[in-house]
Image: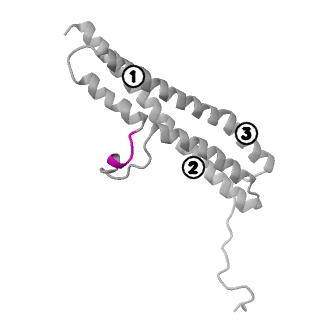
Amino acid sequence: TTLADLQKRFDLHAKVRDKLTETHDAVTKLRDVRDQLKAVAERSKAASKDTTIAAAATALTKQLTAVEESLYQTQNKSNQDPLNYPIRLNNKLSMLTSVVDAADAPPTDQAAAVYADLAGRIDAELAALRQALGAGLDGFNQLVRDRGVPAVVVKEKKDRKPEGAPIP
């Protein structure tokens, strides 16, 4: 194996690694945003009983979840779950590293084609995520500002006594 062949193998492996890192970073980011959307929706309901923000949060959450489920298999909880639920783009890309590393030779044309296909499909999902986190999130944030949802809401303890019961 020549140094040039090993360099080609390394270059493809590095591209796979970088795309996989970008994919996992995107999943982490969208999960954080989704948690924040849920919290804002709950504060909105507690503060004003208005469901408009909750509905907007739900719609944006659905967009984020669709991207996540394309990139990452969210149903895997045990070692047997991959048998029941199909692998997603991140798993396919991850498995490509073992194909690239399998031989002391340059990567095959097929490995490069698989990378190009998977990277293109991941890029399409990341573009959808950027759109949701861009215009979609900007619209949601504007709605929250317009409705004056407070940043912090103090929750009052609910009285456990039935209504009309005498107070001791």
Q: Who's the residue at 32% across and 31% down the image? A: 95
Helix, strand or loop at mark 3: helix
The quarter of the image holding the N terminus is top left
Q: Is residue 38 magenta?
A: no
Would residue 126 appear left or right of 46 to someone viewing this image?
A: left
Q: Mark 2 = which residue?
A: 35
Q: Which mark is residue 115?
A: 1
Residue at mark 2 to residue at mark 3: CA–CA distance: 17 Å
From the viewer's perspective, is the residue at label 2 or at label 1 nearer? 1
Q: Say what amino acid the circle numbered 2 marks.
A: Asp
Q: What is the span of residues highlighted in magenta in the rendered image?
A: 83-87
Could you say where residue 145 lies in the image, as x and y percent from the top left? 77, 45
Q: Is residue 84 magenta?
A: yes
Instruction: Judge by depth and name the residue closer to the eye, 49 or 149.
Output: 49
The quarter of the image holding the C terminus is bottom right
Could you say where residue 144 lies in the image, as x and y percent from the top left? 74, 47
Sequence-first tag of 1 and 3? 1
Q: Mark 3 = which residue?
A: 139
Helix, strand or loop at mark 1: helix
Sequence-first tag of 2 and 3? 2
Residue at the extreme right = 146
